Amino acid sequence: MALHFGKRENEINKPLNSGLGTPRYGTTSSATSTPTTPAQAEPAPAAASSAPAAGGSAAPEGGSKLTVGPNIKLKGVEITDCDTLFVEGLVEATMDSRVIQIAEQGAFKGTAEIDIAEIHGAFDGNLTVRQKLVIYASGKVTGKIRYGKVVIEEGGQLSGDIECTVAASAAKPASKPAMALAA
């Protein structure tokens, strides 16, 4: 039985205003419908997400998520307090977030400081990925790119001013520990 927004298939065609005195989990006016009992009609637990995240699940459970759907253009904004940005349209913005996921048809232009970036589409601008940048076969990332770790599938593109921030911090000389003198 298919779930639709937490409802079972047999509840979708139920009239919204069934009148007073009728049972909450009754039958519809159709003669071919079968009666439902309250136990059968209770909504099933909602899934963690209505759509799977692109390329796995880097998205935090229950965190704030902004989805820019296909054919949507979001320009000239600053995105804050967003755990996950999922881009299927076009976003021209600045943001500081945990996760950005750009779908194959999606594009982001601007500046982003992110923990994890998963790119199936296009990114153009200044991108700082504190942890892991994943560029899939259909992905293209251009601009000033800083990352902790990078994974590029065959066919994925990365071009511009590119720097690994982990290598830069590892190259710095470690400070010398202070010596303790025994008395």
Image: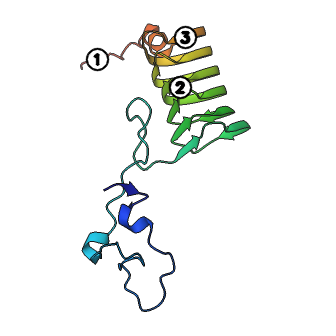
Q: CA distance from mark 1 to mark 3?
A: 52 Å
Whole-percent x, y for residue 37 in the image: 27, 77
Residue 181: mark: 1
Q: Is residue 2 left or right of residue 155?
A: left
Q: Is residue 61 left or right of residue 102?
A: left
Tag in front: 3 or 2: 2
Q: Residue at x 62, y 27 (%)?
A: 107
Q: Residues within 10 Å of mark 3 (few under 14, many from 20)?
A: some
Q: Which image quadrant is residue 150 in?
A: top left
Whole-percent x, y for residue 108 in the image: 63, 27
Between residues 39 and 113, which one lies in front from this camera angle?
A: 39
Q: Residues within 10 Å of mark 2 (few under 14, many from 20)?
A: some
Q: Amino acid at mark 3?
A: Leu
Q: Which residue is identified by label 2?
A: 104
Q: Amino acid at mark 1?
A: Leu
Whole-percent x, y for residue 105 in the image: 58, 27
